Amino acid sequence: MKRTWWKEAVIYQIYPRSFMDSNGDGIGDLKGITSRLDYLKQLGIDVIWLSPVYQSPNDDNGYDISDYQAIMKEFGTMEDFDEMLEEAHKRGIRIVMDLVVNHTSDEHRWFVESRKSKDNPYRDYYIWRDGKEDGSAPNNWGSCFGGSAWQYDDATDMYYLHLFTKKQADLNWDNPKVRQEVFDMMTWWCEKGIDGFRMDVISMISKTPEMPDGEVHDLYGDYNPYCVNGPNVHKYLQEMNEKVLSKYDIMTVGETPGVTTELAKQYAGEDTHELNMVFQFEHVEGNGKYGKWTDERVPLTNLKKILSRWQNELYGKAWNSLFWDNHDQPRAVSRFGDDRPQYREASAKMLATCLHMMQGSPYIYQGEELGMTNYPFQSPADFRDVESINAYKEWVEDGVVSHEVFWPCLLTKSRDNARTPVQWDDTENAGFTTGTPWIAVNPNYKEINAKAEMEDSDSVFHYYRKLIALRKENPIMVYGKYELLLEESEELYVYTRTLEEEKLLVVCSFTDKETEFTIPEEFAGCECMISNTGNAYEGGTVTLKPYEAFVLHKK
Ligand code: GLC
Ligand code: CA
């Protein structure tokens, strides 16, 4: 297996709107990020993945871009960007940009032109189709964020495709001009000195040209078999690699919904010349009662089965991202751990141990390193996220299910859980802004905040810091081979990593009860690399505390 810097890196995701506000308008910004680089340096991360900072009307918080080469006014200027990049580099931190090129905003100048007439030079930049005989949409596909995936446009009496909101029009990647525009834009950013791209829903850029109706699952037909891992996706990524990526020493990660382990070996194979790694969702998907919406937990045995399959099948062949949460997911500690006050810290540290000891590049989503929790939403008016707002409308207001049934699902899964401001200290608005924050601050900021955690050597923050430092000293954490033990346990997640003569034993308790665990003979007397309790692990049977985690190192 090739050793590379991006396999060894720990990545920290910043969702700029909620990270740090420098000018009191209630919205996080680039200067805010620059002001917190020392904090990130102290944490020890290597790479920042910056969610979109480009000009955008913010229908989907920057994932609807109207100019790829301009900075969103609310976030600052291109000078602010250059300064942030320079300051990050001074600290040895790389910056990976979000590349959102499955679609653009309907306010992007290409789309403004495209919709004008059927013979406009930009017409074929997007996917236009006639309606059916009766004037209805070309097929039954549903958008990811509710409603049909087709929007009728008066100007030319045709429909355009949008797999997300109607303000996110899908680009036509089959048009070579579109690909060249995207490649030129990417080159422009690379020349500026950025360190890579996180590619938004990149597995969806190639569509089956016939566009048949999809099987109806929830309210609409499924587009997945026809838009996810489509016929030309690998060809286009290889072209991108040849024309842009291969010319720079950058990191590339593809957000790849719907990818299988087999396909990941193509997207992110050691020698396939597409991307460095995939970012896939099988372990956070779980089948919801209503689309993605559910309040049920995935049983630990299922979670282990999924994660282990990815660990085993990609080993030596392709590279994966490791994550529990991001800006589209609820908070890790609330979802997979236990956010009740007596268990929050232990379970946050346990989850970190479980993830960082696996093979892949670990991602930390802002605030995860503090053990930030889901938000206690009180009413539908508390939501800012277009997906949550649309879902409430489509499922409850349109009468499919009752508020009582749907509400817990929304509370559990809403993306806004992850989007509340980072809790910096115990002053007003958690130190995020001196103004009114665009989305409410979690009321638990007085107890959970960066300042308090930095001062407490036993905090979740310092535990993450230690895990990151361990990764730098122990290549086995990056390159060791994974093996799952105790497959059937619903309480314990136990696995080993092996690199030549060296071996790690990783033990994580996913329960609020005490459990017994017998340390395998070969680890008796081995050094404890990290633990979230003060326990001793000489050998024999130990009684584990709720959410206990430890790692033994056999050299
Ligand atoms: C990705 C992003 C998500 C966004 C969607 C559409 O899944 O992570 O935030 O809404 O793509 O761009
Ligand atoms: Ca601001």
Image (cartoon, rainbow, N blue to C red):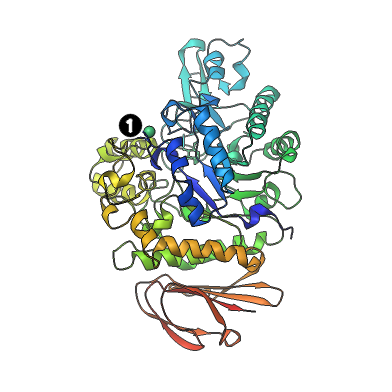
Q: In this image, 391 relative to 15: left or right? A: left
The residue at the point 32 percent across, 51 percent down is 425
Q: Nearer the viewer, residue 347 or 255?
A: 347
Whether disc 1's CB lies below 8 Å from ligand 2 is answered: yes
Q: Nearer the viewer, residue 16 or 297?
A: 16
Which quadrant holds the C terminus?
bottom right
Circle 1: is it few (<14), some (14-19), or many (20+) Cα within 10 Å? Answer: some
Q: How many marks?
A: 1
Residue 194 in the image, given as x and y percentages of width and height: 61, 38
Callout 1 secondary element? loop
Q: Nearer the viewer, residue 364 or 237?
A: 364
Q: Which residue is mark 1?
A: 25
Q: Nearer the viewer, residue 258 or 342?
A: 342
The amino acid marked with disc number 1 is Asp
The residue at the point 43 percent across, 34 percent down is 61
Residue 413 in the image, given as x and y percentages of width and height: 37, 49
| Residue 359 in sight here | yes
Residue 511 in the image, given as x and y percentages of width and height: 38, 71
| Residue 223 in sight here | no
**Is 361 rendered above or below residue 20?**
below
The residue at the point 61 percent across, 49 percent down is 278
Quarter of the figure with residue 87: top right
The residue at the point 28 percent across, 64 percent down is 341
Which quadrant holds the N terminus?
bottom right
Residue 144 in the image, given as x and y percentages of width and height: 46, 37
Q: In this image, 363 relative to 75: left or right? A: right
Quarter of the figure with residue 307: bottom right
